[in-house]
Amino acid sequence: MTTAQTHKLILEPGCTAKNYWRDLFHYRELFFILAWRDVIVRYKQTTAGAAWALIQPLVSIMIMTVIFGNVAGLPSEGKAPYLIMVCAAMLPWQFFANSLSLASQSVVSNANLISKIYFPRMIVPVSSIVVSLVDFFVACTILAGLMVVYKFVPTWRLLALPGLVVLAIAAALGPGLIITALTVKYRDFRMIIPFIVQFGMYVCPVAYSSHVIHDKLVTKFGIDLGDKLFLAYASNPMVGVIDGFRWAILGNSSTFYWPGFLVSLAITLTLLFIGVHHFRKTERAFADVI
């Protein structure tokens, strides 16, 4: 005969961080429940259902290929087909954009739950990112299909993909936590996020290779200044994520600019730390503000 285990909430001066992460682990079942609920609700009562996870990135990939590849004539990386190059960037970008949008609305959407009981509020935005992760894995079938059609064989670099997925999650979670906390207090951010996502798609090297930006800057400003300007461009966390995905997926057709990747990685980790710190600092007032 087993007895039910109880969890004690400990309010101990100077140990809030230790108790918080312990509570976060204790409420892991709530995390899975919320994540599973969000996955089900996302495509509930839709005709296409989960197929939307394929339709949205596929349409975007086709449009960008036609406009930037065929009309503008932008080059691909190495011998890789332009369509695969765009797809390799669209997958992490779509994940980031969906994560940012869903996380920003997550706390407000769960106002009734948050105002009634205690649990670590970070569970809510993190569980919403799981929905985007499911969409990401579904959309990966597009990439697999394109590789079969173009007979494009990946190399050993594909083994680095799981680590890059973790990096993409970190890149989405940091800004996501910041935006979530701000949205609770300032609902205007619900209107701002779509503009950020739309603008970011063209700032990030989704429809073009980041080498195009680097070469243009070096040609116009010289090697020294051009490299410095490109490092500033690479401070965008998604530049490193996208370049990493292309390096892993395109194999020998893609080269890697390590200084830019390291700058992007540093910014990603910094934003993640700031996001966690800011969210934890403000979440105690969510029940009152929301």
Image (cartoon, grey):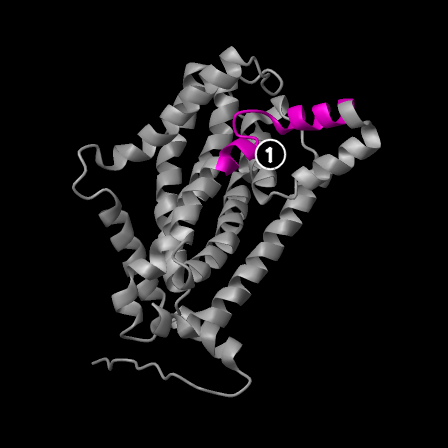
Q: Quadrant of the N terminus?
A: bottom left
Q: Is residue 1 left or right of residue 205?
A: left
As displayed, is residue 37 above or below residue 65?
below
The residue indicated by pointer 1 is 243
Image quarter in which the C terminus is found: bottom left
Q: Residue at x 56, y 34 (%)?
A: 203
Residue 206 on the magenta span? yes
> Magenta stretch?
199-219
Does residue 259 appear to the left or right of 203 in the view shown? right
Magenta part mainly helix, strand or loop? helix
Residue appearing at x 51%, y 11% in the figure: 71
Residue 119: in magenta span: no
Q: Measured from the top left, where is residue 137 in percent x and y?
A: 38, 38
Q: Is residue 153 above or below residue 44?
A: above
Residue 214 x, y percent position in the rendering: 70, 28
| Residue at horizontal 42 percent and vertical 52 percent from the top | 189
Q: Position of residue 9 (x, y in %)?
A: 38, 83
Q: Position of residue 142 (x, y in %)?
A: 38, 27
Picture quadrant where residue 10 is located? bottom left
> Which amino acid type corresponds to the residue marked 1 in the rendered image?
Asp
